[in-house]
């Protein structure tokens, strides 16, 4: 079933069906917890811990639970299996499996009811009529959320990437390198920008939230459709509902609002690191009008490059950023469309993923080979990374052989790598994920 076929309405109304739920999203370490604490300080809005309802369960799993003739057994099992930092989410909401079961048993089978077995029950238990949900990476699921809740209020928060990426080092699942984290920020920021086109969506900057709190909260309240309350300036009480015992990096949210972490990177981050992140995240820095923006002199698309694979070439990222060269994550299909630069150079660190299905793999392989042959015929110098290794399949070994015949080994530090402004490269080899 496609996402367009999600059931939105039914004959039997859901609890809180006429309310406008609030979804708070953003890139990690951008102030989502603070924003949720301020909003849930309102006398009518409740917000509990992160549900990860959309990020840790698939559409297919949820819909299978909805269509289960033994409703709500699968739904209860799925909801009570979700964990946050090793803790069961339903327990963080101070709910029992019996309460989840009873709520769903009395509700129309739907994905909305499954989520609301956490959020709406929590709101009811603390005597508030409205509920908000805050899970940062739900920004990747907003179209799906709006299919379920077409009238939902979406609030996105953004923060200077140099501060956000440095702060991500506190997270157990992130890198201890702010530069590596910046590739994660880069990916999520592009999604956040796309989300701004969605209806009922509003974006705020963390820096404005802490420096112009009254103005920003007024703006948010107008967006939500509620009256601003003076209690919203004090997040100390509502914060206890948002932070779980094992999320120690969120403890400061219970303190009074201050701007001590605004543009902290200027005094705490090494200049080379700040420049590298400024190049990687330059589009977001320009879009959200952050200080000291830098535009790259040269952009090199790197296929498969993300915050995991960037670890392997982190030193090269810094070295190239000193020359204003930006290694840009690129998608597989761009390899077939991208033109070699004016210097006619086509470096390949490794080949992109080509999928698991045999027919698609075969056709993609043929297209890659044709592309390489055309470039070679046109005088393009094909370069390949000497450290790349072939995959286990016959097609991957065959392409590797073609590249070694048509191309020349190169070093990422060579002068060849820096020539041209339209250079194709790759960091993932035939479905082999680099760890």
Image: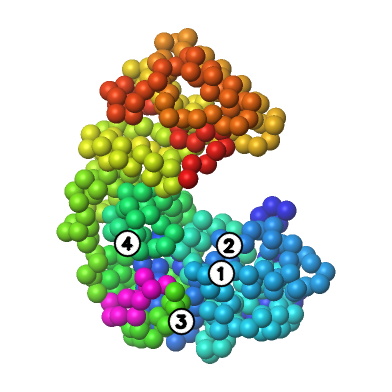
Is the Cβ of the residue at disc 2 closer than 8 Å to that at disc 1?
A: yes
**Is residue 130 part of the magenta span, yes or no?**
no
N-term mark: 4 or 2: 2
Q: In percent of the image, x 74 and y 82: which residue is there?
A: 106
Label of residue 56 in the image = 2
Whether residue 88 is visible here, answered yes or no, is yes
Name the disc covering residue 241, or none: 3
Residue for point 43% across, 70% down: 223
123 is higher (above) or lower (below) than 192:
below
> What secondary structure is found at the residue carrying circle 2?
loop
Position of 321 compared to 94: left or right?
left
Magenta segment: 247-257
- Closer to the camera: disc 3 or disc 1? 1
> Which quarter of the picture shows residue 342?
top left
Quadrant location of residue 160? bottom left
- The secondary element bearing badge 1 is classed as strand
Task: State whether residue 39 is above or below residue 379.
Answer: below
Residue 220 visible somewhere in the drawing: no
- Quickly name the residue at label 4: 167
Inter-mark Cα distance, 4 to 2: 23 Å
Badge number at residue 178: none
Asked if disc 4 and disc 3 are in contact, CB closer than 8 Å, the reply is: no
Relative vertical location of residue 294 with respect to residue 173 in this rendering, above or below: above
Separation of residues labelled 1 and 4 (CA atoms): 23 Å
Among numbered discs 4 and 3, the one appearing first in the sequence: 4
Quote the CA–CA distance across marks 4 and 3: 22 Å
The residue that label 1 is drawn on is 83
Classed neighbour count for the residue bearing mark 3: other residues with Cα under 10 Å, few (<14), some (14–19), many (≥20): some
Q: Circle 2: is it few (<14), some (14-19), or many (20+) Cα within 10 Å?
A: some
């Amino acid at each position: 079933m496609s996402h367009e076929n999600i059931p939105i309405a039914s004959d039997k109304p859901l609890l809180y069906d006429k309310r406008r739920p609030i979804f708070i999203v953003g890139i990690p370490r951008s102030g989502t917890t603070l924003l949720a604490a301020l909003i849930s300080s309102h006398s009518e809005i409740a917000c509990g811990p992160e549900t990860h309802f959309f990020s840790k369960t698939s559409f297919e799993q949820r819909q299978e639970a909805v269509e289960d003739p033994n409703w709500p057994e699968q739904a209860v099992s799925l909801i009570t299996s979700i964990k946050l930092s090793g803790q069961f989410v339903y327990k963080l909401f101070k709910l029992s499996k019996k309460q989840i079961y009873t709520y769903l048993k009395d509700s129309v089978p739907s994905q909305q009811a499954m989520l609301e077995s956490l959020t709406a029950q929590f709101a009811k238990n603390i005597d508030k009529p409205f509920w908000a949900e805050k899970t940062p990476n739900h920004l990747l699921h907003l179209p799906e959320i709006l299919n379920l809740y077409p009238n939902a209020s979406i609030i996105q928060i953004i923060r200077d990437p140099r501060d956000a990426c440095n702060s991500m080092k506190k997270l157990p699942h992130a890198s201890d390198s702010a530069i590596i984290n910046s590739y994660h920020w880069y990916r999520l920021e592009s999604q956040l920008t796309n989300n701004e086109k969605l209806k009922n969506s509003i974006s705020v900057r963390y820096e404005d939230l802490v420096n112009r709190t009254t103005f920003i909260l007024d703006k948010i309240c107008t967006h939500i459709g509620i009256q601003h309350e003076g209690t919203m300036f004090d997040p100390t009480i509502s914060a206890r509902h948002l932070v779980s015992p094992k999320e120690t990096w969120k403890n400061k949210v219970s303190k009074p609002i201050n701007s001590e972490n605004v543009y902290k990177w200027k005094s705490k981050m090494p200049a080379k690191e700040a420049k590298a992140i400024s190049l990687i995240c330059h589009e977001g820095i320009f879009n959200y009008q952050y200080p000291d923006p830098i535009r790259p002199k040269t952009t090199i698309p790197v296929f498969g490059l993300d915050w995991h694979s960037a670890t392997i070439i982190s030193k090269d990222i810094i070295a190239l950023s000193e020359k204003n060269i930006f290694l840009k994550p690129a998608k597989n299909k761009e390899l077939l469309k991208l033109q070699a630069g004016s210097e006619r150079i086509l470096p390949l660190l490794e080949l992109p993923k080509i999928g698991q299905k045999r027919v698609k793999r075969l056709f993609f392989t043929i297209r890659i080979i044709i592309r390489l042959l055309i470039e070679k015929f046109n005088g393009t110098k094909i370069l390949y990374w000497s450290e790349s290794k072939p995959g286990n399949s016959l097609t991957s070994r065959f392409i590797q052989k073609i590249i070694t015949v048509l191309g020349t080994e190169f070093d990422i530090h060579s002068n060849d790598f820096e020539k041209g402004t339209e250079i194709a490269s790759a960091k993932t080899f035939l479905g082999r994920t680099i760890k």
